[in-house]
Amino acid sequence: MIEAISRAVEATLTGATRGVVTGPIHKAVLYTAGFKHPGHTEYLAALCDGGSGAPMPIMMLAHEELRVIPATIHVPLRDVPGLLTYDLLLNTGRIAAQSLRTRFGIADPRIGFAGINPHAGEGGAIGREDFDVVAPAVAQLVFEGVAAEGPIPADTLFYPPHWRRFDAVIAMYHDQALIPIKTVAFDEAVNVTLGLPIVRTSPDHGT
């Protein structure tokens, strides 16, 4: 399986094929066999940069109703606050905006950022991450000309009239992004990897 993924990426990088479509992988089985990457997305990034992993892969779950991007992917929930940095969110927003323009044909994409804490932290009263990390990254994106907004409380942002204001929503962790998209479009959304030099898609579910 790993060899098949590697050969598919190589074929696309050399121009023999125009993209890569992958199926679900059973991570526990692969880990037992010595697989060193958290998932497909991270492995593809390493393959696209000769093994260094320099490209920043972004996982987008896309459907005509909703596009969501988890800022952190295959990590335990307890690790998420420490992984959410200004640079991570800023670069995620930049890649999302650029990809929406070039791959989805949206000239002026609107991007909503979910908060990580209840009520998006209440201005720092319920955790500092939204106030200290998310808000400054969004402000910088706005300064750069991106129509970004947030942090928005996730329970409000994922109410349909609110998410429909945006061309994509950036969530802070895996399930914050995948629960709403699977509620809306289970087995109908497509996983699109942004931030790579190749086109890669897969189903919206794992094993």
Image: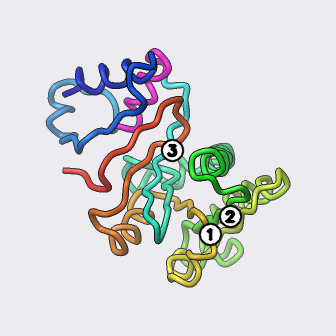
Which residue has dot 3 on it?
58
Which residue has dot 2 on it?
110
- Give me the C-alpha separation between circle 2 and circle 1: 5 Å
The residue under label 2 is which amino acid type?
Arg
Label 1: how many Cα within 10 Å (few below 14, some 14–19, many 20+): some
Label 2: how many Cα within 10 Å (few below 14, some 14–19, many 20+): some
CB contact under 8 Å: marks 2 and 1:
yes
Q: Regarding mark 1 in the picture, which secondary structure is present there?
A: loop
Helix, strand or loop: magenta stretch: helix
Return the disc, 3 or 1, that comes first in the chain's sequence: 3
Which numbered mark, 3 or 2, is in the foreground of this view?
A: 2
- Give me the C-alpha separation between circle 3 and circle 2: 17 Å
Q: Which residues are magenta?
A: 40-52
- Specify the label residue 166 is tagged with: 1
- What residue is shown at x 63% (from left), y 61% (from top)? 129
- What residue is shown at x 18% (from left), y 40% (from top)? 28
Q: Quadrant of residue 165?
A: bottom right
Q: Regarding mark 3 in the picture, which secondary structure is present there?
A: strand
- Identify the image quadrant of the N terminus: top left
Taking the image as shown, residue 37 lies to the left or right of residue 125, namely left
Taking the image as shown, residue 142 lies to the left or right of residue 74, namely right
